[in-house]
Amino acid sequence: MKLHAVLNPGQLKAFLTSYFYVAAETRWQTIRFCIDTGSPVTIIAENDRILMGIEYAELERDPTGNFGIGGKVDIYESPTPLTFEFVGETGVYSHTFPRLRFMRGHTRQARIVARVVPSIVGLDFIMDSVRLTVEGRKTVFEVKDQPVPAMLGQ
C-alpha cells in the first residue's frame, strides 16, 4: 500500500497525515507529521499533544532530557502503545508506537519554539516501511498491506 506525503513548498518539508482516535471524546484527530530521516524516533509536538487530549501527568518523563532547536526540552514517553492510522491508496494503514515520545520546552525560549515545531515521524516509523521514495515534490511511503479485520456478525 502506498501512503502519499504532501510537500509544503514554503517550508520545503514533506508532511504525512495521520489520524488518532481520541477515546475520551469519541472522535478522530488529524495529526500531521513532518518526515525527518535524521531523527531516530517519532516525536509529538506540544500542539499535537494537546489535540490528542494527552496530559503530561499521563506520561513518563525521560530523566536524561535533551537539547532541541530552542534550548533544553524535556522528553516524555507514553506508558502504553499508541496507534495512528494513515489513509493509503488502497485502504487504511495502522501503525502502533510502543513508547511514543512527546517534547516539552524546558526553558522559555524552548517553549516558544515548541509551539511552532511540528510533530516529526522518525526512523522508528520509516524503517518499518518497505520503501520511501522521494521524486521531486512527491514523497511516497510503501508499507505492507494489512489484513482487513472481519466485520462483526459475519
Image (cartoon, rainbow, N blue to C red):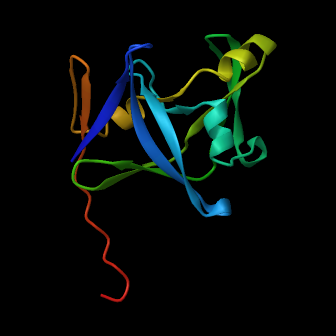
Q: Quadrant of the C terminus?
A: bottom left
Give whichever of 151, 60 is nearer the camera.
151
Q: Is residue 150 left or right of residue 67?
A: left
Residue at 66% from the left image edge and 31% from the top image edge: 46
Residue at 21% from the left image edge and 48% from the top image edge: 1
Q: Is residue 79 left or right of residue 37?
A: right
Residue at 70% from the left image edge and 44% from the top image edge: 59
Question: Which x, y percent locates residue 80?
Answer: 59, 53
Question: Which x, y percent locates residue 47?
Answer: 65, 33
* Res 72 visible: yes
101 to 71, vertically: above or below? below
142 to 132, vertically: above or below? below
Give whichever of 23, 37 is nearer the camera.
23
Q: Residue furthest bottom?
A: 153
Give the image quarter of residue 40. top left
107 to 101, vertically: above or below? above
Question: Which x, y percent locates residue 65?
Answer: 69, 22
Question: Which x, y percent locates residue 25?
Answer: 66, 61
Q: Is residue 28 left or right of residue 87?
A: right
Residue at 41% from the left image edge and 17% from the top image edge: 38
Give the image quarter of residue 122. top left
